[in-house]
Amino acid sequence: MYDVNELLELALKETENLNDGEVFLVKELFKGYEWNRIPRKDRLLLGTLFLNHVNRQAGKMQPIEKTTSGQQKYKMQLEK
């Protein structure tokens, strides 16, 4: 299994496949069975690391509202 930093890199690479304006959750960047195999503590840490990365980078992704289950939603905003 991957460590959390490798999972973060995989998630960030997968965002390259998203379209402008697309709304997504971090878990949607992984296949269902892959996400389910990640231990819960690592999924929580991955979510925190992903949000920190988005907040540090200007532009491409914006955090928007959270779901009712507390998962952070993001929106792709590609440069024009």
Image (cartoon, rainbow, N blue to C red):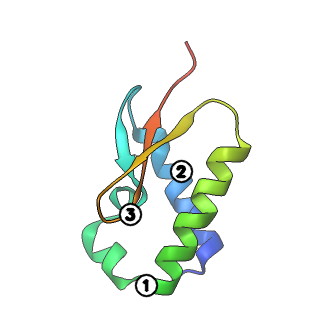
Type of residue at label 3? Gly
Find residue 25 and report its horizontal and vertical position in percent: 38, 54
Under circle 3, the secondary element is loop
Type of residue at label 2? Lys
Quadrant housing residue 19: top left
Find residue 22 and report its horizontal and vertical position in percent: 35, 34
Residue 57 lies left or right of residue 12; in this view the side is: right
Q: Which residue is mark 3?
A: 70
Of label 3 and label 1, which has the lower sequence position?
A: 1
Of label 2 and label 3, which has the lower sequence position?
A: 2
Query: In the image, what residue occupies the spot 63% across and 29% down?
Result: 59
| Up/down of 9 relative to 63, above or below | below
State the count of labels: 3
Residue 13, numbered circle: 2
Circles 3 and 1: CB atoms closer than 8 Å: no
Query: In the image, what residue occupies the spot 67% across and 52% down?
Result: 53
Type of residue at label 1? Arg
Q: CA distance from mark 2 to mark 3?
A: 24 Å
Whether residue 1 is visible: no
Q: Which residue is mark 1?
A: 40
